[in-house]
Image (spheres, coloured by chain):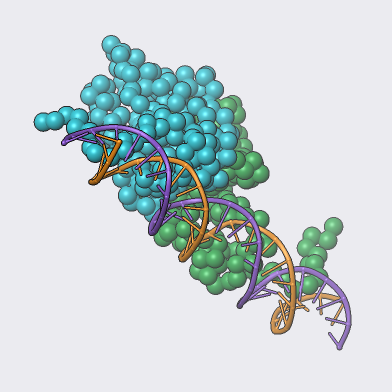
Chain colours: A cyan, B green, C purple, D orange
DNA sequence: CGGTATCGATACTAATCGTAGCGAAACCGC
DNA sequence: GCGGTTTCGCTACGATTAGTATCGATACCG
């Protein structure tokens, strides 16, 4: 049926990309807590109310921002080893981008005690990778979730403790360890 | 020299244990953000001002609470394998305790953009384990920090995503993987 | 009993989240 | 061009929270 019947009224201005960029920039500069919606809106050059018309809460905005930043996982490998390496390097690159780790930590914090937000987090951010990896790596769902916990958890903990991304030699060690584990 | 010369004036009432317990209880029930200092104080049966006389900020209070909860790492193993297993199980038990994971996530969030708090976190919480493990496992400092990232990061990510502690079979898999990695 | 430092209680400032209401603007079909 | 509909920017607002200031009461010491 009508695939794109434009609804009546003034269309939404296409500023989502601007808002996401402004969100990461602000979170990077000030941290999650002090990255107020007011400041994010100002950085994006729009009004705060416009943000709340599109995302129901600050946590949902940041989660959407993370989903947008991570994007699809490019798995082109011919072997499981190649795919594991590609996935880990993908995660390491993304988490090293300014503001991503801080946004992650903030969303985790908000998600505790907010089941709705945790649902969004698990469904929109983790599930796509779980599906792709389950198919691509040929492992059980439990095994894939275990893999995701290790990759993302380890990289985030390093960022949280030191404020710096994991050095390349440690990323290499992480890849080798997981290649052996998933052999 | 005088080991315990009591300073003049009214001594501090010994309520630290009560406050720590109330902190974890409240964070467990309401999450880090809504666990206000007012509520924690009420749960501990003391005044909010008493808390601020002892800890400079909510983040510092929760960090001290985590330090108190984790406590010293009991390493009695005769082999590196035994010590690795003991350390992982120790972390898994602690992080599974109510409120601990939520407190961790909250402190990480606050620590970004608050270098003082990150310093406390790194120095008071991570350093003792780094020292003990470096000595006990006979590994380089870099290797031990890598080990800590994997253990704590993985366990926290599972708690943050699902709200439930990691199941025992996955903890066993984590142990085996790390034993192989650190062989 | 005097000196000193803590305790409880109250009040306060400064931020912040999220909502409500308003007139102006953008786009559509006619 | 014109009415209908929806989003936009803007301002204002209520509720909640971190952290500070203050004051009388209290506990311990010599």
From the top left corner, tell me how far across and down residue A85 is, in percent. 38, 18
Seen from the viewer's position, the closer of residues B1 and A167 is A167
Q: In this view, does C21 lie above or below A75?
A: below
Q: In this view, does B19 lie to the left or right of D29?
A: left
Q: Residue at x 31, y 45 (%)?
A: A119
Q: In which quarter of the image is residue D5?
A: top left
Q: Which residue is drawn at 47% across and 38% down?
A: A46
Q: In this view, does B69 lie above or below B122?
A: below
Seen from the viewer's position, the closer of residues B170 and A132 is A132
Q: Is residue C21 left or right of residue A35?
A: left
Seen from the viewer's position, the closer of residues A177 and B112 is B112
From the top left corner, tell me how far across and down residue B55 is, in percent. 65, 57
Q: In which quarter of the image is residue A153?
A: top left
Q: Residue at x 46, y 23 (%)?
A: A93
From the top left corner, tell me how far across and down residue A170 is, in percent. 51, 23
Which residue extends farthest top?
A78
From the top left corner, tell me how far across and down residue B24 is, in percent. 48, 58
In this view of the protein, can residue B40 be seen by the observer?
yes
Q: Quadrant of the C terminus of chain A?
A: top left
In this view of the protein, can residue B82 be seen by the observer?
no
Q: Residue at x 52, y 33 (%)?
A: A25
Which residue extends farthest left?
A1
Q: Quadrant of residue B155?
A: top left
Q: In which quarter of the image is the N terminus of chain A?
A: top left
Q: In this view, does A33 lie above or below A147?
A: below
- Number of numbered discs visible in the structure rendering: 0
């Amino acid at each position: 049926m009508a695939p794109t019947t434009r609804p009546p009224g003034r269309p939404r201005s296409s500023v989502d990309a601007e808002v996401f960029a402004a969100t990461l920039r602000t979170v990077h500069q000030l941290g999650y807590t002090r990255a107020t919606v007011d400041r994010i809106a100002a950085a994006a050059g729009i009004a705060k109310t416009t943000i709340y018309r599109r995302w129901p809460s600050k946590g949902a905005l940041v989660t959407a921002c993370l989903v947008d930043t991570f994007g699809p996982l490019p798995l082109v490998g011919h072997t499981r080893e190649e795919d594991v390496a590609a996935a880990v390097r993908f995660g390491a690159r993304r988490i090293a981008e300014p503001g991503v780790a801080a946004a992650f930590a903030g969303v985790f914090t908000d998600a505790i005690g907010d089941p709705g937000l945790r649902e969004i987090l698990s469904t929109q951010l983790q599930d796509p990778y779980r599906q792709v990896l389950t198919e691509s790596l040929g492992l059980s769902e439990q095994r894939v979730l275990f893999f995701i916990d290790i990759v993302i958890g380890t990289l985030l903990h390093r960022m949280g403790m030191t404020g710096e991304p994991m050095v390349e030699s440690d990323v290499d060690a992480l890849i080798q360890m997981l290649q052996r584990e998933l052999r």
